Amino acid sequence: MEIDDAGRLDGLLRRGAVSVAEADSLRLAPVPERDLADTLLLRLCMQPTDEAAENLFLPDFGLYADLVKREPEALGRLAEPVARVLGAAADGYAGDNADERSVAVLRALGGPGSNPRRWALALEARVFAHRIRDGVTRPIVGALGLAAVDIDAGAPRTAEVLAVEQVRRLSERWIADRAGRAWTDAEIVRVARMVTWPEAEVNDVCGG
């Protein structure tokens, strides 16, 4: 799964849900350091959710770790738990601890859960929910990403699962009910605020 805000807007345009002018009004200026971190986290989820055969987080995280060392302010636009976990993972990152640290990041930001797939699905939901609640993306655009997160049969009724279910209904309502979009936007934001980051310890990530 990718952020792909532009692609989701284009999809709304192709469906006739928005006009060209409305699509333009829904585009927000990108926040590069936030988009970079969110993209990394979504790529971390792709192997456990069977979207990729390999860990797509590893090739890019070494470069991200170098960026954080050069410019620590790259962590400044992230939620504090995310900045703490990624900063800890970047500190002392090396080829011989890459796999260990990628699993630690997934567990720290996707947990609690019973297995890596559950961590990954929770992490995907948290990334999209927080893009909505932080105003990084328009509610409907973030909602379409959140709605695409899988829900496993028999999954616990976590805040993330409930948010995905509710946002699926709300995104369809947004498309169908043009007059009620302001209300639906507010409901999407309310649902996104149900989803929070876990309070992971730095030692859980860097093995200290």
Image (tube, rainbow, N blue to C red):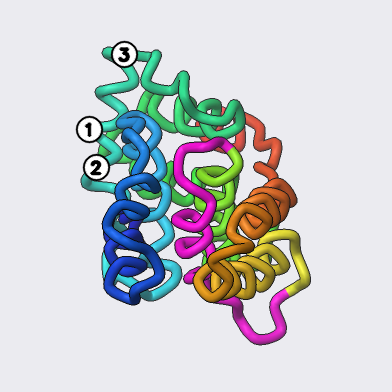
Residue at 47% over, 51% down: 103
**Mark pair 2, 3: CA separation:** 16 Å
Q: Residues within 10 Å of mark 2 (few under 14, many from 20)?
A: few
Residue 91, position in %: x, y? 40, 23
* Secondary structure found at label 1: helix
Using the image as rendered, state which of residue 132 and residue 118 is in the foreground.
Answer: 132
Out of 99 and 189, give the one closest to the viewer.
Answer: 189
Image quarter in which the N terminus is found: bottom left
Q: Do the residues labelled 1 and 2 touch (CB within 8 Å)?
A: yes
Residue at which label 2 appears? 60
Q: Distance between the residues labelled 1 and 3?
A: 12 Å
| Residue drawn 57% across the image and 27% down it | 208
Q: Name the residue furthest bottom.
A: 153
Question: Magenta stretch: residue 100 in it?
Answer: no
The residue at which mark 1 appears reads as 63
What residue span does the magenta drawing correspond to? Answer: 134-155
Identify the residue shown where x is 46% and y is 62%.
Answer: 145
Q: Which of marks 1 and 3 is in front?
A: 3
| Position of residue 180 measured from the top left corner of the image (x, y, whole percent) | 63, 62
Q: What residue type is labelled 1?
A: Leu
The disc at residue 71 is 3
Magenta-colored stretch includes residue 143? yes
- In the image, residue 49 lies at what x, y percent? 44, 71
Mark 1 and mark 2: Cα distance apart in space = 5 Å
In which quadrant of the rendered view does residue 172 lie? bottom right
**Mark 2 vs 3: CB contact within 8 A:** no
Residue furthest to the right: 157
Q: Is mark 3 on a helix, strand or loop?
A: loop
Considering depth in this image, is 106 or 132 the residue closer to the camera? Answer: 132
Kind of residue at disc 2: Asp
Q: From where the camera sits, is residue 40 visible? A: no
